[in-house]
Image (cartoon, rainbow, N blue to C red):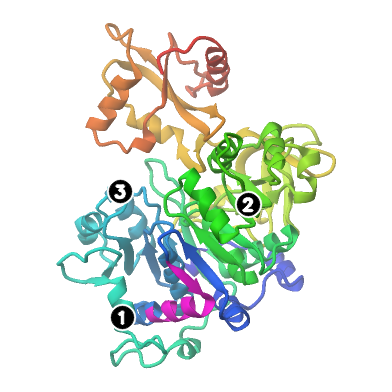
Amino acid sequence: MTDEMKINAIQREKYLSKGYWKDITLLDCWRESVKKYSEREYVVDDRGKRYTYRQMDEAASKVAAFLREQGVLPGDAVSFQLPIWSEFAVVTIACFMTGAVAHPIAMSYEEKELIRSMNLTESKVYFGPSFFHKTDYASRILAVRESIPSLSCVVIVGGEKPDAGAIASFQEILDRCDAGTGSMETDQAESGPADLDRAETRRTGEDLALILCTSGTTSGTKGVLLTHNNIRYSEEVFTRELGLTSEDIMFMPAPLNHATGFHHGLIAPMLIGAKVVLQQKYRCREAIDLMNRERCTFSMGATPFIYDILRELENGGGELPFLKLYLCGGAPVPGYMVQKAWSFGILLCEVYGSTESVPHVFVRPEEALTLNGTTSGRPIEGVEIRVVDDEGNDVPPGIPGEELSRGPNVFVGYLKDKRITDGALDDDGWFHSGDLCVMDEAGNIHIIGRKKDMIVRGGENLNSNEINDRLEGCPGMGDHTVIGMPDDRLGERICAFAVPLPGFEHLKLEDVTGWLCRNGVPKRFWPERLELIDRIPHTGSGKVKKYLLKEELEKRMEGPEHND
């Protein structure tokens, strides 16, 4: 995988000379925090699990010893499909300890997506729950195991272990390790954390640390490659510019396999010796109680989380006396929401970024009330921003264009896809986001749309073309397309426009979703609104004029409800 990384040589030297990139890994950072904050709590979850830095270190050492026993070598990928549980952190740090590349997988991934992503990364070990939220994950991974040749072992976290070969229990891994050393009771691993410094394990800051898989189209999943330097730099600057300290307590309701959850939920607190509080399944009332019980001072997530919290507080659902800062990404934050949050003593700040560039632009807390939802903010230290037209020329302030970013945080390529890498990451190190924005004279940018056909629903990126493809063959539906429709809570929802076939002039949304259900299409790809139209507008080259449909949807949403 190292051979696939694309790094501009000039920028590399610049980052090294300025100290942005260093010859240290996230494991080095972890050990430093364990030394400083040994008895402070690092991770707490709503299942009652609590880990100090020392306890987390011991648990992760045990899992690392197990990974070595399974033949996991530095640079190998380890996949884990885990809820927002403390065990997610244990496995992550165990990967750092072995030099493995962490590959967290979305809980929503089903058989085909598992096969695709794990074959892409050539994962050696899989960690997943036995059963979670009405889904039998153990049966699912066992059903596809033979289709993943690199997979040597499955580890079940929580619940009963299936009676099958090459299956391990997470709890058994911890139980059969010597409590003080983290060593397995085998001849293969005879020492604990100290042994992790051996030469074959030693990694550098420029080695891969993480592969995050984006929501792929029908052509396949993209694996975003991130180094130790990418992640460490991003979070060091993030915590510094927000003024966060070891006394702060993070509440993280967002999935940890997302850039937001992984970077800001696990790594940022780790670097400063802070605590993170996890909620496995977001429920607003329980979230407020949990934040108060743990005295959480800041949080971060998609718009729906803070939308629900503010509504609950407004309706007399308690208070949040300790929460001072909420960072909101995934959709623009309207000014009225900023003001509403402040009425409860919470500074609401918009952030912007992507899996490839991590949130690298945000509104500083001291400017939140002044800017009042008019901008996504300014870039962090070390990150450059350009706004360009379709020919790649810089546009003046106030003129819309595509957002390009370059900096120590930017990913180093897509796994096993040089063509797509070259299309997104140019030779000078600029990442072409595909997002449209306007920059003001002060360097603040405002995201106004996307060149990419992505719908950001509740912080999850869904490809509208993939959703549209899944509608092919639906009875009664002629020409059709999918767009995002604005939603106060989720940021966007899925809206389908369709030309009804003769005899289906009264096609209903429930007809479409019923057909999708019968055909096994995951619910997250179902349209949430159906609009019938006489003709889908196309360009001369056949592309859908989605901007015209967005204008039409706006008109219809202002009038009487149609068939949603």
Classified by dominant secondary structure, the portion drawn in magenta counts as: helix
- Is mark 2 in CB contact (under 8 Å) with mark 1? no
Q: Which residue, given by chain and number where applicable, does mark 3 sit on?
A: 110
Determine if the magenta segment contains residue 55.
yes
Instruction: Report helix, strand or loop for mark 3.
Output: loop
Residue lying at 62% horizontally and 49% vertically, measured from the top left:
320
**Reading the chain from its start, which is encountered first: label 2 or label 1?**
1
Residue 563, can we see it? yes
Which is nearer the eye, 521 or 424? 521
Q: Quadrant of the C terminus?
A: top left
Which picture quadrant has residue 35? bottom right
Which residue type carries mark 2? Answer: Pro
Q: Which mark is residue 175?
A: 1
In percent of width and height, residue 470 lies at 33, 32
Q: CA distance from mark 3 to mark 1?
A: 31 Å
Task: Please report the bounds of the magenta region as a residue range.
Answer: 49-62
Residue highlighted by disc 2: 359
Q: Which mark is residue 271?
A: none
**What is the x, y in percent for residue 542?**
47, 22
Task: Kindly identify the amino acid type of the residue bearing the numbered disc 3.
Answer: Glu
Which marked residue is nearer to the observer: mark 2 or mark 1? 1
Q: Position of residue 84 (x, y in %)?
A: 43, 57
Quadrant housing residue 185: bottom left
The residue at the point 46 percent across, 49 percent down is 214
